[in-house]
Image: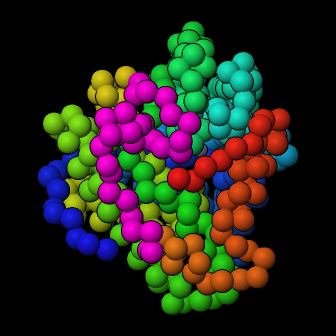
Amino acid sequence: MSAAPHIKPIDLAITVDDLLIWDGTPLPAGYSRETIVASMIKTFQSNGLSGIYGFPHTSPLDQDRGLISIIDHWCDSGHHIANHTHCHACLNWVSARFYCDDIKRAEDHIGQLIQKAPKRFFRYAMDMSGEAERKRGEVEDFLQANGYENAPITMWFGDFAWLAPYYRAVESNDEAALAMLRKSFLEAALFQLRSHAKAARLMFGRDLPYIWLIHATPIAADMLDDLIVAFKNEGVRFVTLENAMQDPIHRAMPRVSPKFRNHLQRYALMQSVEMEEVPRAMFASILNAAPMPGVESMEIYDTVLRKMCQRASGTYKWDWS
Ligand SMILES: [Zn+2]
């Protein structure tokens, strides 16, 4: 991967999505939803970071109400909880009406915890806000009427892509693959930090206090400390989500797009700004690492997405491009 120029200091708010990782996600032996979140809490603590917003979808609680202890642990450790829908359905798959009801369904499970946070934040599943302005408008009206602010994502690195390969590498004790996956996880995070900052500077003439996404996955738990150190070395200063949300770029809405893009990437689409992406060859080697029959990366991600859609009785369509 080519080295991008060193960046200026930037402010960044960490957010953690899907504290109860999606149904259908393979977890290697030795990892559970509990241990992953507990490990992340410990790392934040040792780095002096608190007040981090977690965005859990809540459908796993339908099967196992006991999982609420994970979210309680998060809150008891000085972090906050926000609404991320119940089913984690993409707004493209369902009606605005269903989507708003689904936000309410999440409240049935974690409404009290959401209420305890300094702000009532919401995040669209996959940060995708639908394919039509009118539909998004209906959801936005609902959010406003219910005291929510949409907390979008303005920096991510596709961290979920490591889920299946990391599972295979841990399960098969493939040390070479594990080393490659951990190294590439860090490299991709830094690459996308630079790429998002570069695009923001080009579009807005300045940096944003970026809102960064990581999911509660095994590799994220194992690499979180290294990520925080690498970001600090890159000149990142960690700020709160409340602080980052004061930026008008986060409060405004770029034009809707049905594509799998975050908030900053939608601004880039709107302005035809090309954002640098992690080289395809590198992504291919990540997805194909530690091959194992019956555990193919893209099949797993497709299954996970279809499960979400089925739960929401939605119309499945998905395009990775
Ligand atoms: Zn999510």
In-front residue for pair 275/222: 275
Q: Is residue 276 above or below residue 317?
A: below
**x, y percent for residue 294:** 78, 76
Magenta includes 267?
yes
- In the picture provided, is 106 more to the left or to the right than 9? right
- In the picture provided, is 175 more to the left or to the right than 34? left
Which corner quadrant of the figure contains ligand 1?
top right
- In the picture provided, is 294 more to the left or to the right than 238? right
Q: Which image quarter is the N terminus in?
A: bottom left
- Residue visible at 32% across and 49% down in the picture: 274
Q: Quadrant of residue 304?
A: bottom right
- Residue visible at 40% across and 28% down in the picture: 254
Magenta includes 226?
no
Could one spot residue 79 in this view of the protein? no
Could one spot residue 184 in this view of the protein? yes
Main SS, magenta residues: loop
Q: Magenta stretch?
A: 253-282
**x, y percent for residue 112:** 65, 26
Q: Quadrant of residue 58?
A: top right
Q: Is residue 105 above or below residue 37?
A: above
- Residue visible at 64% across and 32% down in the picture: 91
**x, y percent for residue 233:** 22, 64
